[in-house]
Image: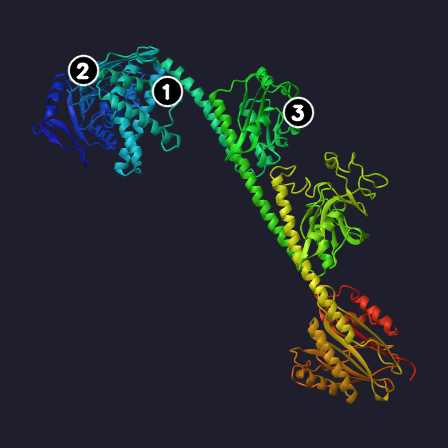
Amino acid sequence: MSEEVLFADPGYTWAVDNGSAAPDPWPAAEPVAAARAADGWLLRGRWILASEPSAPAMVRRLIKAALAGDAWADDLRPDVALIASELTANAWLHGLPPVEARLFAAQEAVRIEISDGSPTPPVCPPVGGQGLTGRGLGLVAALATRWGVDGAGVSGKVVWAELARGCADSGTAPIIDTSIDADPSAAGRASFNVRLGDVPTDLLLAAKNHVDGLVREFTLATTGAQAGSSGPLPTRLAELLRIVTTRFSEPRKAIKRQALAAAAAGLPRTTLDLALSPRSAVAGEAYLAALEEIESYARAARLLTLQSPPQHVAFRRWYVRALVDQLRALEGGGGPITTPSFEQYLLNTLDAEVLAGRATERAARLQRVTAALASATTAEQVADVVVSESVTALAASGGVLLVPADPGHAGQRGGQVLIPGAVGYGEELMAQLRAERLDDRLPAVDALRNGRAIWLESRAECYLRYPDLARLEPSVVAMCCLPLVVTRQVLGALRFSFDHSRLFDADERNFIEALAAQTALALERARLFTAERRARERAAFLTSASDLFASTLDSGRILERLLRLLVPRHSAAAASWRIPPHGISAAVPLDATVVTAATGGADVVRTQGVPPPGPVVAAAGRGAVVREPTTGTVAFPLIVAGRTAAVVALGRAGFADGSADGTADGTADDTAGSTADDASRPGRAPARLPGGTTFAAAAFPDTAFPDTAFAGTAGADTASEDEALVEELIRRASGAFGNALQFEREREIAVTLQRSLLPRRLPRVAGLTFAWRYLPGSAGALVGGDWYDVLALEGGRAALIIGDVMGHGLHAAATMGQLRATARAYALDSFRPAAILTALDAAMNRLEQASISTVTTAVLDPRRRVLTVASAGHLPPLLIPRRRRPWFPPVEPGPPLGAGVADYPELEVPLEPGSTVVLFTDGLVEDRSRPIDQGLELLRRHAAPGLSPERLCDGLLATLDRTHGNEDDVAMLAVSLTDAD
């Protein structure tokens, strides 16, 4: 035989037998060729294939090339090539190397043989099967005239197919009886017979096909990664798939063969009888664990194979665990054990799944509640989440969250309860629940008081333990009440009602208790959040109050602002009394300033000649807070320099008609108080002030801080915090009030000094009419150094002087007095304005005062109607002619006095008959809201000619808004020329 090489490709060897005597590359195949020759088959080609994904495509090309010269094979060539590629793919995927392909021909017929090193025969699925594997063999069966499998010992097998021209059948060719055992590799090994019973054949095939799909995907992915055509598998996934494909292949393939045999026989159920080695137990456990983990990759869409259906998972767990249990028992020397049937396993699994589903549902609901509670910051928000979710989860007819009015004293008898939220209860029942007190014999307050859960499983038990329930809630059949406890402190209770009998099993009690624990933590977070928020609010409130007090130096305004801060935030009414240094008594009338909540703190009512109430007198005398138990009035002293300078009292407002209790004569009526609060506190006769204000009820009423965690009545702790806040507010107001009193004393001294230094009356000068004004700055500004003077000179002339010493207070007033005395002395010696200013500058430099002053000096000659002006940095005078527009003469100002440069130009200005000259300081035309240029223009525009100096001064002060509350001192001097010469 000679060998003619027709095609060569790396990894493949093929030859065509044409009778040459060349050596055979695979001598072991010669008996096969001889056997086929005896049957009339002629070897046309033989190829040794590498284990690569491209092997099927290469076989197709080789087969087509080998049959290219035979015209009779034109019709068979495509089918032969397809069959050869499918058999090659099957050997590559499911067999072992080496893989060889052989082609035979005889009398217009073709035979294909594919041999590999695995003795396990291929599996052909039943017609219409849904598996992803085995479809290639189904295609072979459909195209071939006949096909089969021959054994080659334990070293491998041969899968063959024959096609004959003109003999093609539209049906599927049956597989010829194989000449190999079902599992030759098992020969000679120790094994145990395991019987699992029967299962539905369809389920068995579907489950095995799903696993085969995983094996196929793994094989393709692995070879693709090795060939570089796809990325590598994750290391853990590759290890899991290796376990699935190799560790449990023996039982898996045996089960599949039995299922296929049952399907071929039309049997609806398959009896599983297996002969397995003892090592299959360990392999089975690893196989099942690997498949369970692989499911997570399928769920995350990391695999092409879909997640296993639940019935497949159940079947897999059943048969693998049954195999393992039986093998363990047999290996240990015991006899066969009875394995529950698959149906029984499903029933047991269903019971477990139902219980697990309930637990999962409750855990999910508890998780939802916990997540929702994370954002709850008030008791109402906590109740809204917990009560609604719990009523639904427990199928309760109603539920409510109760909290003690005083959280720190939940065990205190007689205390009240609050209800932040409820579901399923009517208004009548809600009203009764709100009326419960901690000493009532009812389940919810019992749980609050004792900190123990209450479980009532029947109506008889409810009424036996709590008889009042029959009246309170007659429809109740069962009930549970759980205390909400954090660090041994009871914060509240959950109460759930049921209109049917309810047996609270251990799981349900655990769920409700876990719900109560989460609710307690949420309430504690809400309490801490509220406390932190209140602390921020109080700090901001005190800061704003301090700024408000510091913004004024008027002691009266400070007291008014303090009262407005107290009402209505902390009291329904507040009043203040100034305490004179010699003290007060109840018999001496004293002015009071009152603010009430009836006007929202918007109006200030001052009453005069009112004897102060007893608590006020006591607080003034003791210098300490005084509480009147009968009226509820609380009096706070404002301590300044060791003595009580004022007293602030908190109480409640009376009726608008001036009476405390709404009676026509204003008398108190203890039986019908002016508020519902008084009705519940007999014996509190209100102490009334004129103006309709009484000081009764609580100093810190229920409306204080309504936005607390438990919206409603503030507890004792909250009231204590509020009182501490009021005391701090009073303390800060005392400091500001003391500063204001100090300022007012200094200002009074300065004003007295300044007025004593200014001229009490002006001289009479023929032909001139004078008017002057001096207005000290308002409270909030110290007295300044503004001054003016008029001197009669020889020749009927008059010296007009106006000035402004820089600074305020006693220092400025003292400097002003020295300058005025110096100016009077020099004005009488020198009649020129510039000379007067020069002398004043020299005197200013000699004074031991580091001050600067501006001065305007003018000499007015009424006979000649001439005004001579010089300025030391001061504003020019305003000239108001009788028939022309007012104007400012262009006086060139020199430097201010004390600057050390004496240069003061003079300006002579002729005047018309009836003209008026106005000299003024900058306080008249300048303030924070108006620049000086605008003020000067406003002054010029509104200076009306023809007015007397008195009327002119009053009109200009009113126009420029200087009649009251001006920030700076104002000095103004108006001089008019009379018609008489």
Q: Position of residue 794 (x, y in %)?
A: 84, 88
Residue type beneath disc 3 = Leu
Q: Who comes first in sequence, dot 1 or dot 3?
A: 1
- Disc 1 or disc 3, which is closer to the eye? 3
Q: Which mark is residue 179?
A: 2
Which quadrant holds residue 523?
A: top right
Q: Residue at x 23, y 15 (%)?
A: 330
- Inspect this view and state whether residue 364 appears: yes
Closer to the chain start, of discs 2 and 3, is 2
Q: Which residue is mark 3?
A: 429
Front in this rendered view, residue 429 or 921: 429
Could you tell me which secondary element the residue under label 2 belongs to?
loop
Q: CA distance from mark 1 to mark 2?
A: 36 Å
Q: Circles 1 and 3: CB distance less than 8 Å?
A: no
Amino acid type of the residue tagged 1 in the rendering: Ala
Horizontal and vertical percent for residue 446?
Answer: 58, 26
Q: Mark 1: give few (<14), some (14-19) or many (20+) Cα within 10 Å.
A: some
Q: Amino acid at mark 2?
A: Ser
Q: Which residue is mark 1?
A: 314
Secondary structure category for the residue under label 3: helix
